[in-house]
Amino acid sequence: MRSIVAVLGATVIVRALGEALEAGLVLAFSDVDTIAGYYEVRNRLPMLAAVMVTRVLAGVLGGYVAAKVAGVAEVAHVALAGVIQAGFFIMEFTSDGNPAMYPFWVQVALPLVTIPAMLAGAMVRARARVLQETT
């Protein structure tokens, strides 16, 4: 049961936190009042770079939490969660008529950075567990 909670929890954390941080960034640096305006601001290069950074941070946090919940085989659990999350990104980016579409380079980069970011979080947690066990 912990395995399921760890994997699904990581995907929820990465998705929800990533979306929340993106919205916070866009709204902090603009006063858009329409969804079209939101996407126009979000799709500017500096904002997209900041969004990529926040998505990586969300991935690291999601990976860490999933590894902590799993307790054993942390990296394997988080790798599965990362593949699932990347799959969600790919499904989202290949759906037709999606008004929230990122530029192509972001569509390629997000799935590619998600798995390593989540694995980095898992490795930090695995290292912390080893250090706790030795002290």
Image (cartoon, rainbow, N blue to C red):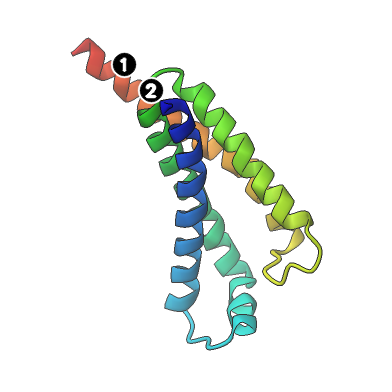
Q: Is residue 23 left or right of residue 48?
A: left
Looking at the picture, tell me which residue is in the foreground, 59 or 85. 85
Residue at (49% x, 44% y) in the render? 59
Q: Is residue 52 left or right of residue 74?
A: right
Q: Can you identify the residue that label 2 sits on?
A: 126
Please identify the residue farthest to the left as the structure is shown.
Answer: 135
Q: Secondary structure at mark 2?
A: helix
Residue type at tag 2: Ala
Q: Residues within 10 Å of mark 1 (few under 14, many from 20)?
A: few
Residue type at tag 1: Val
Q: Please determine whether, in this image, residue 6 is positioned above or below residue 58.
A: above
Quadrant where the C terminus sits is top left
Tally the marks.
2
Residue at (38% x, 37% y) in the render? 65
Give how far across and how far down residue 107 sits, in percent. 71, 55
Give how far across and how far down residue 32 sits, in percent. 53, 86
Give how far across and how far down residue 103 sits, in percent. 73, 64
Please identify the residue farthest to the right as the structure is shown.
Answer: 96
Q: Please determine whether, in this image, residue 79 is positioned above or below residue 36.
A: above
Q: Secondary structure at mark 1?
A: helix
Per the rendering, the mark at residue 130 is 1
Please identify the residue farthest to the front as the structure is shown.
Answer: 1
- The image quarter in which residue 100 lies: bottom right
- The image quarter in which residue 116 lies: top right
Q: Please determine whether, in this image, residue 1 is positioned above or below residue 73.
A: below
Residue 116 visible in this rendered orientation of the protein: yes
Residue at (56% x, 29% y) in the render? 79
- The image quarter in which residue 44 lies: bottom right
Q: Residues within 10 Å of mark 2 (few under 14, many from 20)?
A: many
